[in-house]
Amino acid sequence: MNWKSLKNNIWFKILTNRYVLVLVIFCTWMLFFDANSWLNHKKLDKELSEVKSNIEYYKSEIKKDSNTIKKLKDSTEIETFAREHYYMKHENEDVYIIKHEDSINK
């Protein structure tokens, strides 16, 4: 293939057009090198979805904790909670913790 036949090719004429060259360079710049590039937007969209999932998680945790707080307003519930979670006891009683083999981490 010689130079003349390449120059007469329709694709060569299209790709060497100055407007097409400027458009290709502009699109490449905007997609990869600009501060607001497509790659940055993709990364920011991923972070945004992570933040949204964290918001949902923390909302559910707040709802669960507020239910626990409502439940602990009763003095008998506070005592039950303290006995189960912090192993508190009355003065004249002994507490024995029994762990079954299937509940022990190995």
Image (cartoon, rainbow, N blue to C red):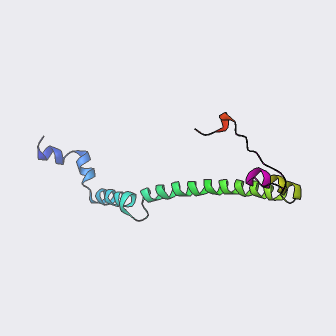
Single out the residue that lies furthest toward the front: 92
Residue 33 as seen in the image, left or right of residue 83: left
Which residues are drawn in magenta? 82-99
Is residue 65 in the magenta section? no
* Residue at 62% from the left image edge and 55% from the top image edge: 54
Observer-nearest residue: 35 or 58?
58
Residue 68 image-quadrant placement: bottom right
Image spot of residue 46 (x, y percent):
52, 54
Single out the residue that lies furthest toward the top: 102
* Residue at 42% from the left image edge and 60% from the top image edge: 37
Is residue 85 in the magenta section? yes
Image spot of residue 106 (x, y percent):
57, 38
Residue 73 lies, with reference to residue 94, above or below; the image says below
Residue 99 lies, with reference to residue 7, above or below; the image says above
Residue 28 image-quadrant placement: bottom left
Observer-nearest residue: 8 or 33?
33
Image spot of residue 9 (x, y percent):
21, 45
* Residue at 24% from the left image edge and 50% from the top image edge: 13
Q: Is residue 74 visible in this depiction of the protein?
A: no
